[in-house]
Image (tube, helix red, strand yellow):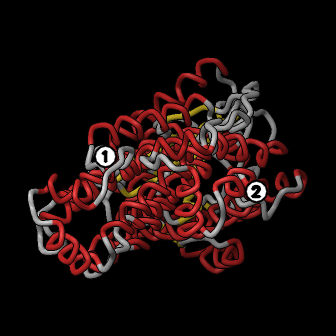
Amino acid sequence: MYKVMIVDDESVIRQGLQSFVDWKSLDCELVVMASNGMEAKEYLQSVQIDIVITDIKMPGMDGIELAKYMYENHSHTKVILLTAYADFAYAQSAIKYNVVDFLVKINPTEKIPEAVQKAKELIALQQKHLSEIRDKFIKEVYDNMISHPEVIANKMKEHGIFLDHYLIAVFEINDLAENHSETTSREYDSLVNQVRHFSNLAFKDSQHYTSIISRNQLVSIVSFANENESEYKQLIPNKCREILKMVDNFMNFTVHVGISLPHISPFELSEAFGEAKKALTDGLYHDIAISFYHPNDTTSLGLRSVQTHTYIDEIITYIQQENAVEASLKLTKLFDSYKENNAPIEHIKAGGLLLCSMTFKLFAEPQWADLSFVNNESKAYAQIQNCKSIRDLFQMLSSFIQSSIHILSSQGNHSNYLVREVNKCIREHFNKQINLQFIAEYVHVNSSYLSRLYKKETGEALMDTLNKYRIDMAKRMLKNSTLKIFEVARGVGIEDPAYFTHVFTKYTGVSPRAFKEKI
């Protein structure tokens, strides 16, 4: 509702305008009636007024003087002048004070709606322009383009931003769809504007400024002047929960909120933004919808190392064994270790990239060349980089592992059944003294036929595959244990240490001892 003040020294005019104009239908509320300019000026010190309808000729301070005062001190308020034919020319001198309209006092109620509508349109245009200026300023402070406290305080005053005890909430909107590229800029714009609307509704009873600062982020600065700080520390998160409930209808999006500490000075605005951003980052990391800044949180991120390579080596082994249950359990343990050590999210992403890279190596043989899963390697890496939280990363990698195992175990055109059985035999018995005959008996075919078939299907001799797998297992054992060289050799099914050294050197280019010394 637009707040209206009537100023006229004639009681009958004031009463007539109050009674015969349907203010409610004009979306207006008549809040003050003053008998002259001085009285109106006094009211304006304590009452926010949008539209002033004033007579020209009044004792003390006339309408022209009041219009000048409004222009110089309350430029956001629009003035409509009531004038008689005799002083119409005099009234026009107020044009320089941006008076909205001049109404002849003979039956003015007929002209009031049209003049008020004109005033409302000017107010809306002015508010839009002011909102854009404020948004630009707040974005510059948020992005640290403006950081000097005095410059910030001066610009706040210039842009009509008044803060006395306030908190800052930063909202980030994220797409839950698997393919983020399918969400158009128009959809994001629509959603972020809707969240802005929800924020304005939630904080309507407080002095607040809500600005869009990026494609999917917005900021609400909420002032709690003259209010109890402890109450507001509860009120702000409660209001944020209301906003999240309103957004809940948009099923393909999620919203996270970071909230700063209370601040008392405009000089601290940049600091408050930093706190809200830090809280938001922590919330995204731990997938907490509403997160608060904690200045006393001295936890050092990632100081205790997580044995990522060990976990990933074991996950790869389970993928090769087509053991989805154990692979998933090992991934869960890896992520539990990340959380226990509060590892930085970029460190976790690096682990995810390594896991995907090693998994794709399992599909390096020619028979997988045309598989869409293999050709989407770059897409998998992009999905990891786009993940915002631990939960997102875990879900993405869990799905990736399941897909990998499903493809390995499928009996489609890309993998001959006998080849799969041979690979399974190698994985299960590589640590024994197996050979071509052993494997042929395992799959119940002639050894010569199996050798030709395997070479045809995979492009690699069966014994090369066996030896490569043994050497891969040996490398892991050399990395992650204190075993001696001959113990590692036995562990991969080769009893003769000298032959083990020969095979290891053939496939790696270095001896087992040299490999271990480089670790």
Q: Is residue 455 above or below residue 117?
A: below
Which residue is at the front of the view, 210 or 272? 272
Instruction: Give, as a three-letter code, the residue at label 2.
Output: Asn
Residue for badge 2: 73
Quarter residue 179 falls in: bottom left
Q: Which mark is residue 208?
A: none
Q: Where is residue 272 shown, x and y percent of the image?
A: 73, 42
Q: Where is residue 48 shown, x and y percent of the image?
A: 61, 45
Left or right side of 461 for 235? right
The residue lying at 39 percent from left, 35 percent from top is: 242
Asked whether residue 464 appears in the rendered view, the answer is yes
Left or right side of 289 for 26? left
Q: Which mark is residue 429?
A: 1
Quarter residue 291 falls in: top right
Asked whether residue 208 appears in the rendered view, the answer is no
The residue lying at 44 percent from left, 38 percent from top is: 202
The residue lying at 84 percent from left, 45 percent from top is: 267
N-terminal of the pair, mark 1 or mark 2, is 2
Which residue is at the front of the view, 115 or 245? 245
Left or right side of 9 for 265? right
The kind of secondary structure element at disc 1 is helix
Total tally of numbered discs in the picture: 2
